[in-house]
Image (cartoon, rainbow, N blue to C red):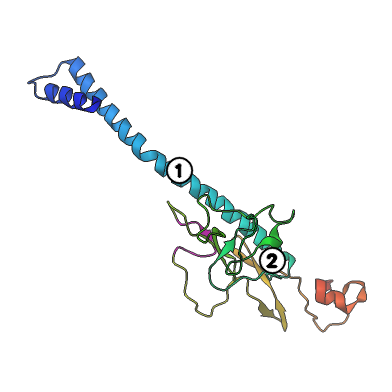
Amino acid sequence: MWHNDVILVTFYIMNKKGFTLIELLIVIGIIAILAAAVIVAINPGQQFSQARDAARESHINTLYNALLSYQINNRGTFGDLEISEELTEICNTNLESPNCSDLIDLSLLIDENYISQVPVDPQGGVDPDGTGYFLAEGSIILVAEKAETRFVGVGVTESEPEENGEFVCGDEVEYMGQMYGTAQFGDDCWFAENINYDGHVSGQSWCYDNDPQNCEIYGRLYDW
């Protein structure tokens, strides 16, 4: 074997009382070859894992943006999407006949305004019919369960915070006697609906087209 010859040459050179320049260069070359062999043997796996995690991060961001847009278009709620309070795997609706009974079905998001198809983890789902990505309601909590080199998710840290009864962006909030949906934009939490507060001062606010139903749908118009 070639590595046995390398070891014998190295042993011979190292047991001499001195080194010539050529012998020293040979030793350096042998060390470089062995180091390169180790790097080639180890690094590809790490590089593939990092590449898969980069894909997972892109998928999580795609899902997050689609869900956020859907939430905004549904007055700060998840509308007809059935999303559990517990992290639940998203169904792989790209399959021909997936069983989504215990999974989250996001097929309503497959639309030109949201996503063309539901992203799937590079190594497949945890459930045979799953995507490998888990979702919980609240401020849109998404986690890639199969992440390999780092935690990949949004809306939650690696250790999910315990329930403490505090307001979480995505919940409804009461303001001036009205309830409003909320949505997360970067680090800020915003109302997902226009204000519908009647200041009880005649002439300072009104409904579009003077139709009270428009105030319920679009909020009120103000001149202050």
Which mark identifies residue 185? none
Q: Is residue 136 left or right of residue 199?
A: left
Residue at figure coordinates x 59%, y 68% from the top left: 139
Q: Is residue 120 left or right of residue 43?
A: right
Name the front one of labels 2 and 1: 1
Residue at figure coordinates x 58%, y 67% from the top left: 103
- Which residue is outermost to the right? 209
In this view, the residue in front, 124 or 80, is 124
Which SS does the magenta portion mostly show?
Answer: loop
Q: Which residues are magenta?
A: 151-158
Q: Are marks 2 and 1 in contact (CB under 8 Å)?
A: no
Residue at figure coordinates x 54%, y 53% from the top left: 121
Three-letter residue code for mark 1: Phe
Q: At which x and y percent is residue 199?
A: 79, 81
Q: At which x and y percent is residue 107?
A: 68, 61
Q: Is residue 157 magenta?
A: yes
Q: Secondary structure at mark 2?
A: helix
- Which residue is outermost to the left? 17
Three-letter residue code for mark 2: Gln
Q: Earlier in the sequence, mark 2 or mark 1?
A: 1
Q: Which residue is mark 1?
A: 48
Q: Is residue 206 visible?
A: no
Q: At which x and y percent is residue 224?
A: 81, 72
- Which residue is outermost to the front? 97
Q: At which x and y percent is residue 10?
A: 17, 25
Give the alpha-carbon distance from disc 2 to disc 1, as whole Å: 34 Å
Q: Which residue is mark 2?
A: 71
Q: Is residue 114 visible?
A: yes
Residue 37's place in the image compared with 167, above or below, is: above
